[in-house]
Image (cartoon, rainbow, N blue to C red):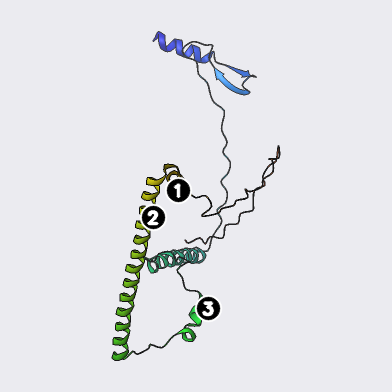
């Protein structure tokens, strides 16, 4: 009972004070473990009035968005498995339009002409083979004659043989005028060239 009387006495001695540092009013006791504090009333902002939207407009908007998505899906399904075109391998529109003009009729070759062409090809192969053999024989004979001449020259004079086996600098005359260049300019900044990207973007 003494505790209850003490609590009632503390509540009766409550005083209203103004705390200027916080800028609000509060009810407090004289201190101690029975300290109480009332927070100020927080007034909320009134809710905005909802705008009424016609259900038909909302339905039409959803249908339009749905059709757009379905169109994108059909486009992706239609282009499935198709690679990006390479301009270097694509036939131009002008050549496609001139296809009938450039089209060549198929030539029908008779059996006699086909046999004659085959025989002519065989004769040409035999001729080129004989020509290759003759050229090789000429080169081999020239190399053998050169080796024999060097052997005989070395037997006669070692100095002449050393001069003969040296490379001839005048067999293939070569003249070169080096690229003329000026001294670099101090502090010169090379301008950046204009770059325009004309690559096609494939979605």
Residue at label 1? Answer: 164
**Residue located at (34% from left, 73% from top):** 128
How many numbered badges does the structure rendering display?
3
Residue at label 2? Answer: 146
Report, in whole angstroms, how far the alpha carbon at label 3 lies from the one at label 1: 65 Å
From the viewer's side, name the closer residue of 193 and 160: 160
Residue at label 3? Answer: 94
Report, in whole angstroms, how far the alpha carbon at label 2 lies from the one at label 3: 63 Å
Q: Quadrant for the N terminus, please.
A: top left
Of tags 2 and 3, which is closer to the observer?
Answer: 2
Residues packed near mark 3 inside 10 Å, few (<14), some (14 to 19) or many (20 plus): few
**Residue located at (57% from left, 51% from top):** 49
What percent of the width, then of the height, locates residue 81?
Answer: 36, 65
Q: Secondary structure at mark 2?
A: helix
The image quadrant that residue 123 belongs to is bottom left
Report, in whole angstroms, how far the alpha carbon at label 2 lies from the one at label 1: 11 Å
């Amino acid at each position: 009972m003494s505790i209850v009387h003490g609590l009632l006495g503390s509540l009766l001695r409550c005083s209203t004070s103004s705390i200027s540092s916080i800028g609000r009013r509060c009810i407090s006791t004289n201190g101690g473990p029975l300290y109480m504090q009332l927070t100020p009333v927080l007034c909320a902002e009134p809710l905005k009035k909802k705008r009424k939207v016609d259900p038909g407009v909302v339905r039409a908007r959803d249908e339009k968005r749905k059709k757009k998505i379905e169109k994108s899906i059909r486009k992706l399904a239609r282009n499935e498995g198709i690679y990006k075109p390479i301009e270097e391998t694509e036939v131009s529109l002008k050549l496609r339009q001139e296809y009938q003009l450039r089209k060549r009729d198929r030539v029908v070759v008779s059996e006699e002409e086909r046999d004659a062409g085959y025989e002519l090809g065989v004769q040409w192969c035999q001729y080129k083979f004989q020509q290759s053999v003759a050229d090789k024989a000429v080169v081999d004979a020239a190399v053998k004659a050169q080796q024999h001449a060097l052997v005989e020259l070395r037997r006669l004079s070692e100095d002449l043989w050393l001069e003969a086996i040296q490379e001839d600098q005048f067999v293939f005359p070569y003249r070169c005028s080096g690229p003329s260049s000026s001294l670099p300019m101090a502090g010169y900044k090379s301008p950046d060239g204009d770059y325009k990207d004309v690559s096609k973007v494939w979605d």
